[in-house]
Image (cartoon, coloured by chain):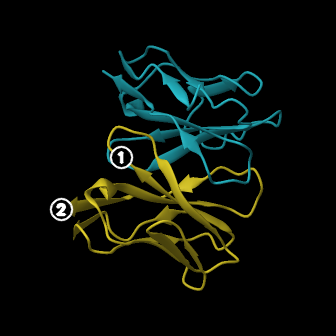
Chain colours: A yellow, B cyan
Amino acid sequence: GESVGLHLPTLSVQEGDNSIINCAYSNSASDYFIWYKQESGKGPQFIIDIRSNMDKRQGQRVTVLLNKTVKHLSLQIAATQPGDSAVYFCAETPNQAGTALIFGKGTTLSVSS
Amino acid sequence: GAGVSQSPSNKVTEKGKDVELRCDPISGHTALYWYRQRLGQGLEFLIYFQGNSAPDKSGLPSDRFSAERTGESVSTLTIQRTQQEDSAVYLCASSLSSGTGYLFFGEGSRLTVL
């Protein structure tokens, strides 16, 4: 069935390093992808999104890359900071307006000083 | 309010009892979502409301689960005859409209079924 998942459940990096969090999706009809960050005890927060007509999108210290050929999505965080420690989820919507987001299982990012 | 508000923040109940969880979305947001998050897991879609359209109930796990929304405001998620496997954080989110992935989440209602 349709699913959105992540390659690794945990990622540990040193402060200042660049982080790359990966996501694989299986629904080739998906056309919109979003990354969310969830800190402990809080609801997820929107980070960045990308539509399927793009390969790359940049935000502040974050970049999302989309490879539709292999159905792979990644989130790159530059100069990772302790405040980036959280669970990161990718989410997708199938190619239909008004359809709910489907979330993957999440990757826990731990940043040590 | 400034954000999505959920209540109660914590609920402990006995197996077999009914519970109601409330969500106040951001004013003006036409879309409202409910998700369930079990400990250490991802977000499981439950139900989605968009304006006056029929809600998308495809994620509700059983007929013990139901939700209502009054116009474009408050929503209530009801779980009847709760089971231990219903224990989770129930997250509500709202967005300006459908077709956007920019959801604003509340902090969730943590449900524990004993």
Residue B87 placement, left or right of B81: left
Labels 2, 1: one chain: yes
Which residue sits at x=53%, y=63%?
A3
Question: Residue furthest toward the right?
Answer: B52
Looking at the image, which residue sits at the far left? A113
Q: Earlier in the sequence, mark 2 or mark 1?
A: 1
Tag 1 secondary structure = loop
B59 or A76, nearer to the observer:
A76
Identify which amino acid the numbered label 1 is placed on: Glu
Chain containing mark 1: A
Residue B69: percent from left, percent from top: 70, 25
Q: Quadrant of the N terminus of chain B?
A: top right
Q: Can residue B46 be seen by looking at this rendering? A: yes
Indicate the position of residue A49 as horizontal and vertical percent values.
59, 63
Q: Chain of mark 2?
A: A
Residue behind mark 2? A112
Q: Is residue B48 left or right of residue A9?
A: right
Examine the image and state in which quarter residue B99 appears: bottom right
Instruction: Determine which residue is flagged by label 1.
Output: A39
Q: Which amino acid is tagged 2?
A: Ser
Q: Residue at x 60, y 29 (%)?
A: B63
